[in-house]
Image: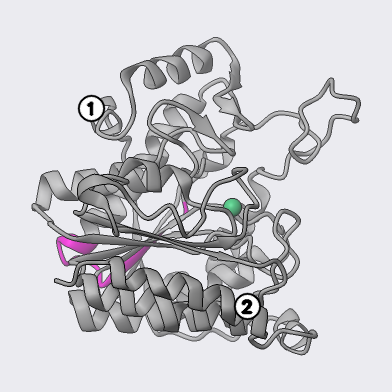
């Protein structure tokens, strides 16, 4: 079986306006290109084609999520708000989430893309799948959009999986450099979903993603945050997977693993302060794939989140897809050996201490 690959040109037409970086016009800064723009995603998609890897993948098509499917994780008021603003020409979903006319429909197609990738895996049409969707989703909370996200694509897909396939244990491994606060919020009191997030400590949103946020009520123990100090490279990320993520997965025994996949922990990303290279993402993918093979018949769905380096996201994405599909192309990442040689790329003692602290959370996770 092969790997599914899902994207759509409309994802690139979601219009995030004329902010400079993340600063909206009118705040004393020249209007310009927002960090969250189509280019890194489009180049990722183009490299999958130019490298020839696409010939080895099963191309999947998205459908639009229904409002009913969105409402499984969002309030009706939030859906109506985005819908009305989109029809009126756009606006801000609440906090750093600018969007334009028609973005509501594109956001439905984005959430629907995550659903379709998941369906293809669950129906056995593909071994695993990557959904390159946009807008991203992991910051959107039930009643608000946030941080470039309108609807929680992964949350919508997980609720769909539960409703359609009766899954009782689904795990997420969010390796975007920012905290997956939205996904966390959607399942914070719910033991049927184990949410794990590796992220730069207190980067975004503010005051979010500490080890102390460990789930509530029935969900106590089922949310694991791994806040990492700035400057972590491949060594720290691989260690975090080996020491925390994989043991947590082994204890939880998910029936499906979903990775909210952001490439903004890469060494040249403008919005993160980490040093991961495409080889780091490659190794992390190997570890998650091995866990999926061991625990859930290889069922793994990746759903795209952040990653803002136009030139580097494509290499990271290609490396992940090469590992998922088992097909190595001739494309070489010229940055990878340079980044591998950067100072403190290997695991540092203060990073190991942060990871060891998060590893203590595994004891709070009831074993299955
Ligand atoms: Zn991010």
Determine if the C-beta at disc 1 is less than 8 A from ligand 1.
Answer: no
The quadrant in which the N terminus is found is bottom left
In this image, 359 relative to 93: left or right? left
Q: Residue at x 43, y 82 (%)?
A: 243
Question: How far across and down, in percent of the image, does residue 60 sit?
Answer: 33, 56
Q: Is residue 264 above or below residue 79?
A: below
Please rate how many residues cluster around mark 2, counting C-alpha atoms within 10 Å: few if below 14, some from 14 to 19, many from 20.
many
Residue at the outermost left position: 166
Q: Nearer the viewer, mark 2 or mark 1?
A: 2
The CA distance from mark 2 to mark 1 is 43 Å
Please rate how many residues cluster around mark 1, counting C-alpha atoms within 10 Å: few if below 14, some from 14 to 19, many from 20.
few
122 or 29, which lies in front? 29
Assess whether residue 37 is covered by the magenta stretch.
no
Q: Residue at x 80, y 85 (%)?
A: 343
- Report which residue position mark 1 lands on: 68
In this image, 54 relative to 120: left or right? right
Which stretch appears magenta? Answer: 121-132
In this image, 248 relative to 230: left or right? left
- Report which residue position mark 2 lands on: 351
Quarter location, residue 346:
bottom right
The quadrant in which the C terminus is found is bottom left
Q: Looking at the image, can residue 52 be seen? A: no
The image's mark for residue 94 is none
In this image, 74 relative to 228: left or right? left
């Amino acid at each position: 079986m092969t790997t599914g690959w899902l994207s759509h040109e409309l994802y690139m037409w979601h219009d995030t306006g004329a902010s400079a970086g993340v600063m909206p016009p009118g705040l004393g800064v020249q209007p310009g290109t927002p960090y969250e723009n189509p280019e890194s995603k489009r180049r990722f998609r183009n490299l999958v084609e130019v490298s020839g890897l696409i010939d080895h993948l099963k191309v999947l098509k998205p459908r639009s999520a229904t409002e009913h499917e969105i409402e499984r994780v969002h309030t009706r008021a939030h859906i109506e708000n985005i819908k009305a603003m989109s029809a009126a020409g756009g606006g801000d979903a609440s906090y750093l989430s600018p969007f334009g006319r028609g973005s509501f429909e594109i956001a439905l197609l984005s959430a629907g893309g995550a659903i379709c990738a998941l369906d293809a895996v669950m129906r056995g049409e593909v071994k695993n799948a990557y959904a390159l969707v946009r807008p991203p989703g992991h910051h959107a909370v039930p009643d608000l959009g946030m941080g470039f996200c309108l609807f929680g694509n992964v949350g919508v897909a997980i609720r769909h999986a539960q409703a359609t396939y009766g899954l009782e244990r689904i795990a997420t491994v969010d390796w975007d450099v920012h905290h997956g606060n939205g996904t966390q919020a959607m399942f914070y009191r719910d033991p049927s979903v184990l949410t794990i997030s590796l992220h730069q400590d207190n980067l975004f949103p503010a005051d979010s993603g500490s080890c102390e946020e460990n789930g509530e009520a029935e969900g106590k123990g089922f949310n694991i945050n791994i806040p990492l100090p700035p400057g972590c490279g491949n060594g720290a990320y691989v260690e975090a997977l080996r020491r925390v993520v994989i043991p947590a997965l082994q204890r939880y025994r998910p029936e499906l693993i979903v990775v909210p996949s952001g490439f903004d922990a890469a060494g040249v990303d403008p919005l993160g302060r980490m040093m991961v290279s495409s080889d780091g993402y490659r190794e992390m993918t190997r570890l998650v794939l091995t866990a999926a093979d061991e625990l859930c018949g290889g069922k793994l769905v990746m759903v795209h989140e952040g990653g803002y380096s136009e030139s580097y996201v494509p290499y990271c994405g290609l490396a992940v897809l090469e590992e998922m599909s088992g097909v190595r192309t001739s494309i070489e990442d010229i940055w990878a050996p340079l980044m591998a040689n950067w100072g403190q790329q290997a695991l540092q003692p203060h990073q190991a201490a942060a990871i060891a602290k998060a590893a203590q959370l595994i004891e709070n996770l009831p074993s299955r």
